[in-house]
Amino acid sequence: MSATAAASLTSTGEAVQFWVLGITAVIGALCTVLMKKAVHSALCLAGTMIILAVFYLANGAYFLGVVQIIVYTGAIMMLFLFVVMLVGVTAADSLTETLKGQRWLAALCGLGFGILLIAGIGNAGLKTFNGLGRVNSGGHVEALAALIFTKYVFAFEITGALLITAAVGAMVLTHKERTERAATQRELAERRVREGVQLPPLPAPGVYARHNAVDVPGLLPDGTPSDLTVSKTLRARGQVRDVSAEAIEDLKALEQRSAERLGREEAAK
């Protein structure tokens, strides 16, 4: 079947689906590279993988589509996302080079991958098509296994070796050898006593709270706000409410409503 005849068999719905999802996938891939926060990049990559799964399902490769969602998007990407959120990787961490020259090495690797990709697409046969029925005549899983363990077995083993090497390298780079014994809870408590730091539990936030009040500092017995009751992150972002203005106004409003309620109760008697 010629390329023109194959293109004529494409319905309008398939064409619209391809252009909409293709553009969305390209945008997601660019956002994965250009986003400053690692969590946002991971989310964009997960969305791109889901779109790839939709492409597989639309072309009749149901096994690949399900594997794409369950294994890559559902397991690997979500694991990576949770690790990034728990570790707390920021944009400033990505600017620190743990290995000298790694940016130039990454650029060369990207250039080499681009050349291989262009060469592979250029050598692909675009004039003849075997059709999904002929390729998957023995079943999706059987056909995929036959290709992986016969024609592409060398590339498959090399990919597995690269993944194992990357996992070991990540553990080596992130491992920090402890040079001294970890302090016990008793030693930490004795250190706080000697240094005269906050010994009792921290005071609770938000004395005049109408919600969880993590952005409202608590008041000390003398009425002054305590800096220990709000998170340092909120204070650095400037998201801490002024208790001397808003909280006092709320207190006056509460006192006024209480006085009005007591007046109504006395008038009813």
Image: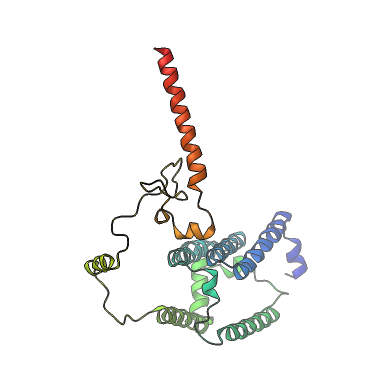
Q: Is residue 139 visible?
A: no
Q: Is residue 183 visible?
A: yes
Residue plotted at (32% across, 80% down) = 178
Check the image and name the residue furthest to the left.
186
- Coordinates of residue 53 in the picture (x, y in percent): 57, 62
Q: Residue furthest top?
A: 269
x and y, in percent, of residue 164 in the image: 43, 80
* Nearer-the-camera pick, 183 or 260: 260
- On the rendered structure, is 241 left or right of 1? left
Residue 149 rendering spot, x and y as whole percentages? 48, 79
Query: Image quarter for residue 34?
Result: bottom right
Give above or below for 169 relative to 209. Answer: below
Q: Position of residue 114 (x, y in %)?
A: 65, 80
Indicate left or right for 205 with 47 as reference: left
In this rendering, the answer to whether 67 lies above or below 249 is: below
Task: Give left or right: position of 4 versus 134.
Answer: right
In the foreground, 263 or 143: 263
Quadrant that contains the N terminus: bottom right
- The answer to whether 248 is drawn above or below residue 8 in the figure is above
Residue 163 vs residue 222, the one in the foreground: 222
